[in-house]
Amino acid sequence: MPTTLEMKTPRLVTALPGPNAKRVLEQDARFMSPSYTREYPLVAKRGHGAIVEDVDGNAFLDFAAGIAVCSTGHCHPKVVAAIQKQAAELIHMSGTDFYYESMPQLAARLAKTMPGAEGKKTFFANSGTEAVEGAIKLARYTTKRDKMIAFYGCFHGRSLGALSLTASKSTQRKGFGALLSGVEHIPYPYAYRCAHGHTAETCGAEILEQLEGQIFKRLFDPEDVAGIIIEPIQGEGGYVPAPKFFLQELQRICRQHGIMLITDEVQSGMGRTGKWWAYEHAGIEPDIVCAAKGIASGMPLGAIMAKESVMRWKPGSHGTTFGGNPVCIAAALATMELIENEYMENARRMGDYLFGRLANWTKNFKIIGDVRGRGLMIGIEIVRDQRTKEKAADLRNDVVNLAFHKGLLVLGAGENSVRLSPPLLIDQEQADFAVRTLEECFREVEKKL
Ligand SMILES: Cc1ncc(COP(=O)(O)O)c(C=O)c1O
């Protein structure tokens, strides 16, 4: 009989949460910050591939991947070996003050993933938030301007600078007082709810008009704008892709006014959409790209990558103690190799397969308003009524919870969407299990209507 971790699909052996999980939950409630937002009581013990085992021996199929982080699956042997080797050799040195071989090696590898004739340089950070925080500083430093434009629904992190760009949920800002001044938000091109009735290809023209005709004329002179930051596919906000033309037009506007185009690829990057970066699908070349999450298979690493002509800040202008730590870099090098050789292609193939299987969901289930995304970044929007598109956060939460009780880990995104962000190594059997399980969940939740 295979061990739990060798299995491809879940096996539940206790009621959930099990007795050991309950003990952890009690201790957590006593000692942990209450700001965390756990959607269901999974208490993880170990993981392998796309399977996670909890403290009671229940095995789950992971279609959340630690919020789109475990790109190569849990504890991929090659990533583990790279971490172990590096940990035995050199754990820390601080790239701000000293050199080590692997740092420029990873930067060179990342540069190769980015299209465009101009060379690219990288600054390593510890997280997505820190990458965004650094990108704000780099855009300001390079342009000698201080205004920023961001989009409603986008999430860029929670430090005070990054939070100023985040406009996802007001609870993320509530109680924290004044944020960065000089930040303006405009709507994200959200085709399913397009105010002007456009399609997924054409939604957003009016937003660009608003940017050029209102923001630039009435609020910020474009020559004061340092950067426009966008998630090419909105993650936290509901897995909403921006149309190709929209990103291309944004690039045109940025170039026209000397504004830095910053793409936040923290969630959409590292092969998840079938290309290294989601912006590549639009054929654009951003000035600054932020990455984190899937870059090091779970080790904390963020990256700000920019055109050579943009990343010219002087020694001392930006730094970090831990960012680009040798162990994280080793994990990232192993991760990139796996993504390049196998998993990016698998993400594209399995994404196509899943979208094929979900093609009729809006017809088959009356609570599904929209299915969207790219590759293994799939959003399913749950509504109370397909005609009115009334958002059904309660039904979405029911689906996510039911899936957990059937052994499938998924997360919500936005107010009322379910996100599928599995490790990039899933196979057809696992995709089929996820589809069948979600269909059962939708049927059960629909019975309540
Ligand atoms: C698009 C995006 N940017 C930035 C962040 C912040 O990253 P981190 O949580 O690593 O600080 C996130 C996290 O979810 C994200 O999805």
Image: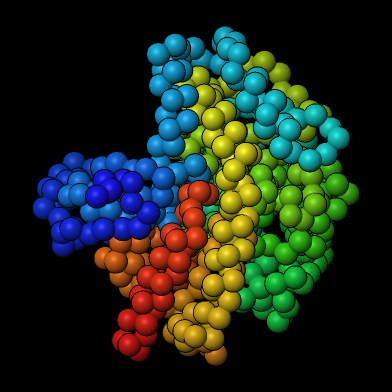
For the point 45% across and 61% down, which residue is it? 429
Q: Residue furthest right?
A: 256
Residue 83 in the image, given as x and y percentages of width and height:
44, 24
Residue 146 in the image, given as x and y percentages of width and height:
70, 40
Colour mapping used in the image: rainbow
For the point 70% across and 45% down, which residue is it? 262
* Residue 347 seen anywhere in this rendered image of the structure: yes
Nearest the eye: 220 or 134:
134
**In the depicted structure, whether residue 424 falls above or below residue 190:** above
Residue 442 in the image, given as x and y percentages of width and height:
39, 78
Residue 261 in the image, given as x and y percentages of width and height:
75, 46
Q: Is residue 29 left or right of residue 272?
A: left
* Residue 240 seen anywhere in this rendered image of the structure: no
For the point 49% across and 12% down, which residue is it? 93
**In the depicted structure, whether residue 196 falls above or below residue 54:** below
Nearest the eye: 314 or 54:
54
Q: Residue furthest front?
A: 1
Which of the 4 image quarters holds residue 97?
A: top right
For the point 77% across and 33% down, which residue is it? 307
Nearest the eye: 448 or 432:
432
On the rendered image, what quadrant is the C terminus found in?
bottom left
